[in-house]
Each structure stands twice: as C-alpha cells, then as structure tokens.
C-alpha cells in the first residue's frame, strides 16, 4: 500500500490537539522511573525515542494520583505530589520537542492495588468485594473518602498541566477504581453511587467535572474504559456503550479510549500471541456506534494492518499500538516512508515487557534489546571496520549479522542448510504462530537486503574460518533436539517435533507427545487443531509450561483443553512399544498409551562441542544464542546485540 493510502497517516483533531497521524502510543507500565515514582532519565529516553519515531500522541503510563495506596503496580509512576512536577515537565518536554503530543494517564488501583505497594494500608473500593487476582478484601469507601479521591484526580490533572503536558487520560478501565464503580459485579452500594447505571456512573462523572474545572477548556481530557470486562456479572458491551455515551454527553471529554478486561480476565488485557490481532476492535466499534461527537481509540495487540483495516471500516478513529512501538519505535516513520517491510514486528510473547513488570523489573523487549536502554544500546558506526564472520543462520546469527552490518562491518553469514531461520522455521509453522512467522520473514528480509554476504549450503569448519581470516567470529550454531535413551527410541513411529512441524513426517491418528514444555505443547496443539489427530502429552514434571510467560501459558493451556489434548504430568517415558508407549508415574505405576506416532519434544541441547572447534580462530570470538544454552528468542537478540556492541 502506498503512503498516501494509509488512513493511519491522516491527521486528526482531538480536543485542543492537532495530531500528525492517527497512531497512539497507549499507556503501558515500564518501571523505568525511580523507586519513589519520579521520572528518571531512563523514562525520558524511552518515551523520547518513541516520539522521534513519529507517533502522533504518547499517553504516558498509568500514574498514581494520591499516596502509595492508589498504586496498582510495583514501581508505578507518580503524580501524587507537587514534588513530581519537575521530572514530569522534563518528560513532557522530551516528548513534545520530538513532535508528539504528550498526555499522561491518571489512575487509582482500588481493590486491584498490589498489596506489596502499600503495606499496612487497606485497599479501597465501592464495595468490600475482593478481587480473586489480588486476594485482599477492600474497605468500602465513605462519601467523604470518595470526594477526597475525586479531588486527588483533579489535583493530579493540575500537576500534569503545570508540567506542560498537553492533556490527561482518566483511567476508568481494567477493573481499577473507576471501573469498580461502574461494574455491577463490584458495585453493590445502596447510596447515590450504586444501583442503576446513572448512579454507578456518578463517581466518574463527578471526577470529570472536577478535572475539567481544574484544568480549563484549553487542555485535552480523555477517558479510558473497558468496553467489556469479560467476567461473569461484569460490565458488558451493551451497558458499556450506554455508559460511554453518558461520559461523552458531558461535553467535557475529548476522546474515549476503549480497552477491556479486569485482573480476573487478564489475558484480554495483555493478549498473547495465541489471540488474533485486534481482538478488542469490536468493543470500540460497539461504543463508536453510540458515541458520535468525540473520537474513539481502539487498542489490543494491533499492528499497522489490523489498525488500518479498523480505520478503513469505520470502527475507530485512532489506533493505539503499544507493544509494537516497544518493538520498533520507528514504526510510524517507516510506515510514512513506505518501508512497512522494515518494521520490526512484535511477536506478542510478553517475555521482555509484561514478564518483567510482574517481577518488578524494567520493561525490555524480546526483539528490541535497546528498549529501556536507549542511551547505551545504540548501533552507532564502529570506530574501525572489521571483517565479521557469523556461523549459523538462526535468529541469533541473523540478528548478529544485521546489527554488525548496521555498524559498518564487512559481514559474511554462513549457514549449513538451504534456509535461514534455524528453529524459527518449525516454531513458526502452526497457524497460531503467525507473529513468529512475521519475525522470521522480517529477519530474512533484513539480512538479504543488507550489505551482507550470505552463504547457504555451506558448513563452516575451522579450515574455512582460517581461509576467510575474520577479525571477529560470531558462533551461532544453535541446538539439536534431545533424544531420550529409552528402549524403542529408534522405531519408525518415533519422530521429533521438528519432523512434524515442517511436514517431513505425517503423524498417525493417535499421537503421543513426549515433553510438556513450549515446543511440546505447541506441537500438540498444532497436531490436534490443524491436523485433527488425537493427542496425549506426557510430561515428567508436575506441570506443563513451567518456564513460560504466565498469560501465554494460560491461553495455551486453555486451547489445549479445548482441542481435547490429554495431559499426564509426573509421568516418565520408559519405553516405546510397537503399539504406543509405556510410562511410569510418581507411584511407580506403569501406564500404556496407544500411539501410532511418538513425537519427541524433550528439550534442546546446546551444540557446545561444535563451539569449541572455533575457539581462538579470530582475535574476537563470541558464542551466542542456543549454542550457549537452549533458551528463547529474547536471549538470541540479547546475545547478538551484546556481542556486536563490543565489536
């Protein structure tokens, strides 16, 4: 699609702002700020990089409005005291000087406040109903306390204006305090703030009045809400649309940002790769059908194609792309330049972003190691051009070659097979792994379009390395599937996950998958969903997917169950028989499972012996990726960048 045809690039007026396009960076927790909630240089660098990348507006992450009692996450940004204004002003300036509008989200965690954020302080809510995700019974707010919190929202908005932000977003989504007042599941009050929709909406309508009175009309005020909470008894789209109209009809809100879910339906809030892109567009559309007077923003694992389609179909007015801008801050600029194929795709793995935040660590990114380290992880021209030889064309090797070429080195990439990609080839085979396939295609394009000499069907040997005489040798020879030493392992019915995923071996009607890690579970799902076979997983540990990111694990587990996959944990494979497998459980009981095909997925072993062959063959030798230890995409990119930044 040519540049002029992208509706994403059309300017739009929102409140007091004239935006350069329709791409919004939504609020996302980063933990790049200081421990007291103040802005750090890391915070500034992170947001400035996205502003430089061409996004129209940045809505800075959810910021707590009063004391630590309103924090919903560890390390949350603060706007609760005037002492925060100085740092916030530097942040707003960094965003605006780079061409983006600067907004900041104002929130209160309510019953979903993390107990570790406010030790000794009781959570509050409209009614004393605990969240199953937090497990704390909140205190029911009094009328006086309600007014104090509303005033805190107004004062937080004042601080944002004093800090020279262009506007604020009132956070009413995701089951936090405002959402708790509007949800029939969590608001059981009998006073003026409970009961019918108009009463439950009173809390936020009064906040809107107070905020607007505090900041005046020359300041943009937006509102974020859940279009559906996806929990039994919670807010549904039908009532959410009526609620949104009440908010819009105040005439005091400049846009509505439609998200969804609560902590009790959290996979919708942080949709993993197993959901389709844009799975929340329909709730934005439903609200836009009733709200005609102000713009609507949609969000939810969107990329440019899904966002553009939503705009073209009139389902939204602006598109929020969150993790996509973590993965590639230059996304809008590349789109405007007609270089969509160069946009580094977010794979929705949540390994660097969400997983870190849950642990109280700064946000990183699986495919963009510079995230959160913008000042230090820079691919600047090398002081001396070197001859770099990369051995192995998996994702680690491809990324090392790409980044070394960007730094100006003379790069040769050697791969023994006839294809680039390594384990990403089989990992991206299932239809539900489309984001990984996007990454593989992107990496191939970057390597093939760059000034990199690619040699396929070439096995690197010490003699070849000596012949090339590189200054820098990057060894990325990967890993191999482990075959457990059990009787019958050499039978014709035994195959590896790779054999099945790439189509080299067709499984029979009854399939046993040995290993309940990510490869085994995804292979089992592929066989069950796409090949329509009966599948059983056997895992020797007490649960499957032990090392996986929580929300991907939750959704993948649910899909396995829905696909009818049988799962046995605490069982060890003892023998492959002519008709299936023999397993032993924790109580030393033996079990027979019928299987026409036995798929081995018992892990990957690093090719360390091969690495040793290349030691000392160049003045600089780096081993990266799976040949160091069989790990994840996150580690492949991290290793590649750390090696190349040293060259």
Image (cartoon, helix red, strand yellow):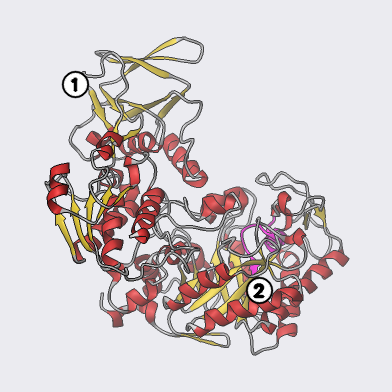
**Residue at 52% over, 68% down:** 26
Q: In the image, which disc is placed on residue 492?
A: 1
Mark 1 residue element: loop
Please tell me whether residue 175 is drawn above or below residue 86 in the rendered image: above
- Quick one: label 1 or label 2, which is nearer the N terminus? 2
Q: Which is closer to the viewer, label 1 or label 2?
A: 1
Q: Is residue 140 visible?
A: yes
Name the side, left or right, on which 29 lies relative to 342: right
Write down the quadrant of residue 313 in the picture.
bottom left
**Residue at 28% over, 42% down:** 478
Name the side, left or right, on which 48 lies relative to 254: left
Q: Is residue 28 magenta?
A: no
Residues drawn in magenta = 170-184
Name the side, left or right, on which 530 lies relative to 249: left
Please tell me whether residue 495 is drawn above or below residue 133 in the rendered image: above
Q: Nearer the viewer, residue 620 or 38?
A: 620
Mark 2 residue element: helix
Q: Nearer the viewer, residue 277 or 230?
A: 277
**Residue at 29% over, 36% down:** 607
**Residue at 45% over, 67% down:** 321
Write down the quadrant of residue 312 in the picture.
bottom left
Q: Is residue 532 visible?
A: no
Q: In the image, which disc is placed on residue 246?
A: 2
């Amino acid at each position: 699609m040519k540049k002029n045809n992208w509706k994403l690039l059309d300017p739009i007026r929102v409140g007091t702002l004239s935006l350069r396009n329709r791409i919004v960076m939504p609020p996302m927790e980063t933990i790049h700020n200081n421990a007291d909630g103040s802005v750090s240089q890391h915070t500034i660098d992170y947001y400035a990089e996205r502003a430089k990348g061409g996004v129209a507006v940045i809505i800075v992450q959810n910021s707590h409005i009063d004391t630590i009692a309103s924090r919903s996450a560890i390390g949350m940004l603060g706007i609760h005291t005037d002492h925060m204004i100085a740092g916030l002003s530097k942040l707003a300036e960094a965003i605006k000087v780079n061409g983006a509008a600067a907004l900041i989200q104002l929130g209160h965690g309510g019953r979903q406040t993390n107990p570790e954020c406010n030790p000794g302080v009781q959570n509050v809510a409209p009614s004393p109903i605990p969240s199953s995700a937090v497990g704390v019974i909140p205190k029911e707010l009094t009328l006086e306390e309600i007014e104090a919190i509303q005033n805190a929202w107004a004062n937080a908005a004042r601080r944002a204006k004093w800090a020279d932000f262009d506007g604020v977003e009132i956070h009413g989504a995701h089951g936090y305090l405002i959402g708790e007042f509007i949800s029939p599941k969590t608001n059981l009050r009998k006073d003026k703030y409970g009961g019918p929709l108009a009463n439950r909406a009173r809390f936020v309508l009064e906040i809107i009045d107070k905020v607007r009175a505090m900041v005046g009309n020359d300041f943009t005020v937006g509102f974020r809400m859940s279009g559906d909470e996806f929990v039994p008894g919670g807010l549904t789209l039908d009532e959410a649309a009526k609620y949104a109209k009440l908010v819009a009809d105040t005439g005091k809100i400049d846009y509505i940002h439609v998200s969804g879910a609560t902590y009790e339906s959290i996979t919708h809030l942080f949709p993993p790769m197993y959901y389709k892109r844009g799975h929340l567009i329909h709730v934005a559309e439903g609200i836009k059908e009733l709200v005609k007077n102000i713009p609507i923003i949609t969000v939810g694992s969107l990329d440019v194609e899904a966002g553009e389609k939503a705009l073209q179909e009139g389902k939204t007015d602006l598109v929020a792309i969150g993790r996509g801008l973590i993965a590639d801050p230059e996304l809008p600029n590349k789109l405007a330049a007609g270089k969509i194929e160069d946009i580094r795709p977010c794979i929705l793995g949540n390994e660097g972003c969400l997983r870190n935040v849950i642990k109280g660590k700064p946000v990183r990114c699986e495919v963009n190691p510079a995230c959160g380290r913008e000042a230090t992880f820079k691919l600047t021209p090398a002081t001396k051009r070197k001859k770099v030889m990369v051995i192995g064309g998996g994702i680690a090797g491809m990324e090392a070659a790409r980044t070394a070429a960007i730094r100006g080195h003379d790069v040769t990439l050697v791969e023994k097979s006839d294809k680039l990609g390594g384990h990403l080839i089989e990992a991206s085979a299932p239809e539900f792994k489309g984001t990984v396939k996007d990454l593989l295609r992107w990496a191939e394009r970057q390597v093939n379009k760059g000034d990199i000499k690619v040699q396929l069907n070439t096995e690197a040997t010490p003699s070849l390395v000596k012949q090339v005489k590189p200054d820098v040798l990057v060894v990325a020879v990967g890993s191999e599937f482990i075959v457990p030493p059990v009787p019958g392992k050499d039978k014709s019915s035994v195959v590896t996950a790779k054999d099945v995923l790439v189509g080299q071996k067709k499984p029979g009607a009854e399939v046993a998958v040995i290993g309940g890690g990510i490869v085994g579970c995804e292979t089992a799902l592929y066989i069950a969903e796409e090949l329509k076979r009966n599948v059983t997983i056997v895992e020797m540990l007490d649960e499957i997917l032990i090392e996986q990111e929580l929300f991907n694990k939750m959704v993948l587990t649910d899909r396995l169950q829905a696909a009818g996959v049988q799962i046995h944990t605490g069982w060890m494979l003892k023998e492959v028989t002519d008709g299936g497998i023999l397993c032993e459980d924790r109580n030393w009981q033996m079990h027979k499972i019928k299987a026409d095909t036995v798929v081995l997925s018992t892990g990957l072993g690093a090719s360390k012996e091969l690495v040793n062959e290349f030691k000392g063959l160049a003045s600089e030798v780096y081993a990266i990726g799976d040949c160091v230890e069989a790990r994840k995409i996150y580690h492949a990119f991290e290793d590649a960048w750390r090696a190349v930044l040293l060259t």
